[in-house]
Each structure stands twice: as C-alpha cells, then as structure tokens.
Amino acid sequence: MKGVLKILMVNRNHSRKGGDSAYAFELTKLLETHGHSVIPFAMRDEKRDMKSPYSDFFVENIDFVEALKISNFKMCIKVITRTFYSRQSRKQIGNLIGETKPNIAHLHTIHHHISPSILYELKKYQIPIVWTIHDYALICPVTLFLSNGKICESCLGKRFFMAIVKKCKYGSLAASVVASIETYVHHAMKILKMVDVLIAPSLFMKNKLIQHGVEENKITHIPHCIDTDLFVPHFKSGDYIVFLGRLSKEKGVDTLLRAMKRISTLKLLVIGNGPSEKELKEEAHANNLANIIFTGYKQRHDIITLVRNAAFVVFPSECYENLPMSIMEAFALGKPVIASRIGAMSEMVDDGVNGILFEMGDPNDLAEKIIFLWDHPRLRSEMGLRARELVEKRFSLADHYEAIMGVYSKLLGFCNTSTTRRT
C-alpha cells in the first residue's frame, strides 16, 4: 500500500499491562517505523499511562474488581452501563475521530472497559474495523473458558446462561449474571456484523472461534511479532529456572510448586504478582521450599536480565493461552520452555526441539520434565538456539507488517471513496 495511513489503535489500557497491551505497543511502533500515524484510544490511567497527545479523549478509568466490591446501586449502574454500552466511550471516540479523521480502526481488548458501543461510531464514519482477538470474550462470558479455576466450555451453542448456573465469574452469582447478560446483549447487538476482519493470533484461537459459531470467512490468522533486536540471546545456562506471569489460579503456579517438592536443590524464581501470591507463598513456606524465591513485580529490563541468565522457563498454565508474548520473549533470549500441552502453547513449543511439553496439571510429569532438562545442559543450549531461530523466522517484524498491511489494503481497497472523503 502506498501513502501514509492514520490508524486508530483501540485497547483498554495505554500502558504495558498485559499481553494485549504489549502487542498493541509493538504494533504501534512497527507502524510508526514505516511512517504511518497511530492514534491511541483507551482508558485514562494517569499512574500507568504512556504519554499521548490524545489522552484527553480517553475514557474514565474503571477497576471492575474494586468496583464490584462496592455494593451500592450507583456503582452497580456504573458497572452495567460501562460493560454493556458505554455512551461515554462512543462520545469520546466520536470526538477523536472528528479531530483526527483516521483511515482505519484496529481494535484489541474492548469488552467491559470500553464496550462495543464504539463500533456504532466507527460505522457512522464508515471506518473499516479490524479486531485482533486476545481473549474469548466474544464466546465466553468470563473470557477465558474457566469456571472456578477449571477449563469449561458449557456455554457452547450460545448457552451463556451456564455461566450463571456455575457461578463462573469470581464464584459470584451477581458477577456471573452481569457477565452472562453482557454476552447475550452483545450478541443481540450483532457486533460482529460491524467488524470487517477478526485477527486470531493463534490457530487454536481461530479454531475455537469457529467451533463456537463465528463465521470462518471473517477470521484471518496472523501471529504476533517480536523485535528480536531488543533481545540479546544467551545460550549458556544459569543456575536457576524461571516462572514469569500473573500469580493466579489458571497460571498453574500451584502445580509448579508441587513439582518443585521433588527438586529441592534447584532454585526457582517466581516473577510477578497477582491474587494468588499470598496463598502461594504460604504453600511454599509450609512445605519448606526454600529454593523458591518470589521476586514480586519487576520492571521490564529486570525481567529480561533474569530470564536471559536463567537455564530455562516454565509455563505451567492451565487455561487456553493465546500465543503468550512471554514465551516469545523467552525464545528470543535463547531460552527453551517447558509448557503445558494445551491451547496455543502447543503451537509454539515444539516438543523436544525448542522446549518440552508436559500434561497440564500433572506435577509428577512436570517434575520429570524439569529434572530431565536440568540434567542435559547441552540439550538446553541446542533447544535455546532452535527457540531463537523460531522467533526470527515465524514472528518477524517484516512478515507481520506485510500481513497487517495486507488486511488494511484489502479493506481500504473496498472503501476508496469513503477513505478519500475522510482524508
């Protein structure tokens, strides 16, 4: 495509908080490197936000976990209206469109925090819409196919009321009712009819969307990308292994702790924080696991250093991950990965080549795989080399840019008249 584009980049956060935000920033940087103009739209968060000349257009920040703790009528109305259809989001994005006149909109995570109400404004201005899917909010009321810490697909066939029956959201009836109704409302709004292209970063995600009724011809598979120049690989092994991620039930850290009971001499760094942090620390203390060190939250440069100097990384997740950026970064640093045989992780970790897969939730199998990889330092180095090669070939910036611009070009080719008018 010739010429400079103005791309409206929409995500719940304008800070590096979560994989969706990390990717949105990576894509923004990539597009800007090629001369395009990227206009962000997100929630306003003065403590975390990256600076933006468009922050005055952002919507009010809302923390749903904290909001749901406040049981009064006013807060309930605020949560419901923001979740189902946010007038504020629609108004603010309309103002931003009027000010900047973008050619195309690229959405990321908008459910709950921004709401699909913005789709009406985008269609009003005839702006083509691309939506990269980072979770399962379109087909699962709790977005992760989890119910009380276990994988659940009871809502297959648009039976979203099952989220209420099973109290899938935080184990709370009230939260589950809101989540279930939200999904029904958004299906009734026919929000997917307003979206031109859905991008699934993993084949697992694409197939899961199709299985749950999303039109196949609307979905294209484009993996995430990574700037490997920012990650200097280190193929020699350190004297510890690493878990990196949110400390919550679905990440499988408790399974990892149970596995580590058999490996008392190997040091494990647990990097991150989250709702299960206190419980996990108590479990480690109760089992005298002095070899496990909880580092808490770390800045990005510190994380890179810790992972780079590790022997390998363990991702024992017990949910349907969607092409985790953390695995890509571990690979870029030349580190093999031991991961659960589930979701998109099986697409990334080639068992025995750049890492090892184990049976999800099985601490004995995990312990055996950790011991095996630790006992074979030469194999670790070889796997690390293959891991680095994978990200260079499969997740390159050049290939990703070409794929994204292919989507943009096709849509703008169908909308030349309106594009010229907006520009």
Image (spheres, helix red, strand yellow):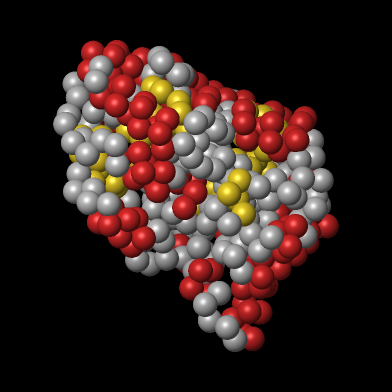
**Residue 385 drawn at (x, y percent):** 31, 15
Indicate the position of residue 310 as horizontal and vertical percent values.
22, 32
Residue at screen point 45% across, 26% down = 357
Quadrant hosting residue 105? top right
Quadrant of the image containing the C terminus = top right
Report x, y in % for residue 120. Answer: 74, 57
Q: In this view, does 65 lie above or below 71?
A: above
Residue at image point 66% right, 70% down? 173
Left or right: 110, with 239 as reference point: right
Is 169 in front, or is 186?
A: 169
Residue at 76 percent across and 40 percent down: it is 212
Task: Give coordinates of residue 131: x percent, y percent.
Answer: 63, 43
Nearest to the observer: residue 4 or residue 194 = 194
Query: In the image, is 165 to the left or to the right of 399?
Result: right
- Residue appearing at x 77%, y 60% in the figure: 161
Asked whether 368 or 40 is in front, the reply is 368
Q: Quadrant of residue 407?
A: top right
